[in-house]
Amino acid sequence: MGASIIPQSPALRFTATLGVYQFAPAVTVLELEDQLSAKQSQLNAMLSVAGESRLDCVSDSLANYFWACKATAEEIADLTAELLRRNSPQQS
């Protein structure tokens, strides 16, 4: 019986030192979906707080806050792309 071979994942786009974060070959689709759901909830909460506040904090803090939102959005995009890649029929 042949082993299922998953092609190498593309490089992640979110901020991390190269090689620190990567999709493990053994990670399941369910685990990816769970992580995606968690990241979506985090981003939703972050943006809700931003929408409810007067956003009158120090500009550096505000820039860092929205940088964190952007990084979370990029993680969501990468997780989504990986799920789509794993769920797509393999090209021969």
Image: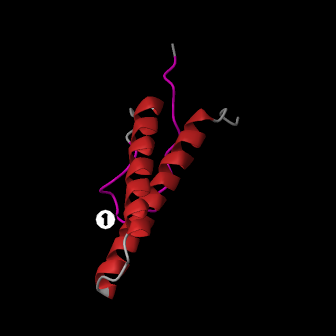
How far across and how far down the image is residue 18, in percent?
Answer: 34, 63
How far across and how far down the image is residue 46, in percent?
Answer: 38, 61
Quick one: SS at disc 1? loop
Residue 84 makes an appearance in the image = yes
User: Label 1 amino acid?
Assistant: Thr
* Residue at figure coordinates x 47%, y 60% from the top left: 74
Counting labels gives 1
* Residue at figure coordinates x 56%, y 48% from the top left: 81
Identify residue for label 1: 17
- Position of 20 relative to 29 (above/below): below
Q: Quadrant of the C terminus?
A: top right
Q: Give yes or no for residue 18 being in the magenta stretch.
A: yes
How far across and how far down the image is residue 27, in percent?
Answer: 39, 34
- From the image, give the main secondary structure of the stretch colored magenta: loop
Dot 1 surroundings within 10 Å: few (below 14), some, or many (20 or more)?
A: few
- Which is more toward the observer, 6 or 73? 73
Q: Which residues are magenta?
A: 2-23
* Residue at figure coordinates x 53%, y 47% from the top left: 80
